[in-house]
Image (tube, rainbow, N blue to C red):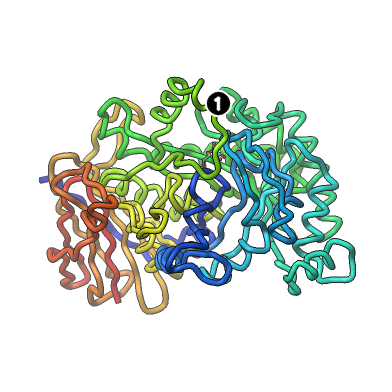
Amino acid sequence: MPRAHITLDKQAVVAPVRRRTFGSFVEHLGRCIYTGIYEPEHPSANEDGFRMDVVELVRELGSTTIRYPGGNFVSGFRWEDSVGPREKRPVRRDLAWHSLESNQVGLDEFARWLKLTGSELMLAVNVATRGILPALDLLEYANHPSGTALSDLRVANGTPEPHNVRMWCLGNEMDGPWQTGFMTAEDYGKVAARTAAAMKMADKDLELVVCGSSGSGMPTFGDWERTVLEHSYDHVDYISCHAYYQEHDGDLGSFLASAIDMDYFIDTVVATADHVGYKRRSSKKIDVSFDEWNVWYLKEHQESQEVNSEQVNAEWRHAPRQLEDVYSVADAVVVGNLLMTLLKRSDRVASASLAQLVNVIAPIMTEPGGPAWRQTTFHPFSITSRLAAGEVIRPLIEAPMYTTARYGEAGVVDAVATVDEDRAAVFLVNRDVAQAAQVTVDVRSVGSARVIEAVTLADADVYAKNTLAEPHRVVPKVNPSATLVDGVLSIELPPVSWTAVALR
Ligand code: AHR
């Protein structure tokens, strides 16, 4: 049995836990909005048409900041279509996802929904196919109190209080040829700088996110970040990272080590941003907004798009089933480990968004007229969001290594911890595909004396999933092996598992 020893040093503080790490993402895509969060005919719907069964699950998930309305969708979006009397809102073609957008949910409704879930709004503006003025108009509509044309329009539309949106994304994945209106780094850097400067003339305290690469595998990765920031450094606050992982060709060992790639991605983007900053002799630091991350079986999605391209081209449907990935235990372990990595990098990752929230590569699934349920990936996210508090501690991990085809050497066990005044939490994964790992954690420096909670997500079948027919097939279970004696926590981690231990 592999053995690992972890030491927590209360002094090894990375940064305070940033609540925005537990953000999420809602795009007008597939059934994320329609029959996901919004379904007026559903038995649980409130007066606005929002499914309250989904609201309950989002609260339990613990999503903080929610990015909206896209994603690729935003690059063809006219925000004006989505406000005002619903019966007057136009139906439009969404080129990004080849579907119809009814605009029955827009900014004001979504902001009301966020009040139900207790989350913060993070808005994206369309810099791809629109310009500075529509971005400023949206800012005026959303944030100006009243007494101007667009703020009064918001009031007349039934929202007297401004939405006071703090975080704004300057477009989405502008490096991707799939993006409507994609640009070169030079062109985008200039557009982003001008749009950001204008938005800050309206409100200097806005927090603006410039688009980084769509993934570390993009051919322009690195150069893109450098060029874009050379233009926009003085006007923006964060640069985005997007990363999706999946198991390729049955290589579970590499897949379980995906967090290594995320860590490398963050390192590289931070180094590039700092390089641009040093060259400018700037004292300002640009942090990362990791505003899309998840497991996504993207390769299969792309292949099915190619096979069905003629049929897809002929059909324009409203809220079709798209990207409804069903997640396994292994997927949940990877999601838990990616979230641990985001926590470990809280020094430079200011915000993150699990992509996405409902039905579309999501932790929450729904059936029209039917139930809503938790995917496997729901659990590590919701438990981490609930338990992580205070300061992030980088643990010293002594664990056996294994060799992966994709990411080189990886530790069999990975961990992160958070320490608050009177409590601590340790999050662990065992990446061994066959064997349990025996782990000891020296918590003497933290001063914890008892285990409050120890839960593990694992299954004899690492590909077990939750489905409509069996929504509770995979749930976290109490880990009875957890004991704390003389300041040392001992715990057994099953193969391919994610674990959280809360201490007091
Ligand atoms: O999250 C799904 C899509 O992935 C988003 O719309 C896009 O930004 C990314 O490519």
Residue occupying image coordinates x 74% and y 55%: 88
Count of residue discs: 1
Q: Amino acid at mark 1?
A: Ala
Position of residue 41 in the picture relative to residue 134 (left or right):
left
**Which one is nearer the viewer's eye here, 188 or 224?**
188
Residue at (56% x, 72% y) in the render: 47
Q: Nearer the viewer, residue 434 or 399?
A: 434
Q: Residue 259: percent from the left, percent from the top?
A: 38, 42
Q: Quadrant of residue 491?
A: bottom left
Quadrant position of ligand 1: top right
Q: Nearer the viewer, residue 417 or 354?
A: 354
Residue name at image x 23 percent, y 53 percent: 470
- Horizontal side of 21 relative to 177 (left or right) equals left
Q: Residue at x 30, y 77 (%)?
A: 504
Q: Where is residue 99, by image quadrant?
A: top right
Mark 1 lies on residue = 314
Residue 496 placement (x, y as % from top left): 22, 45
Q: Residue furthest bottom?
A: 422
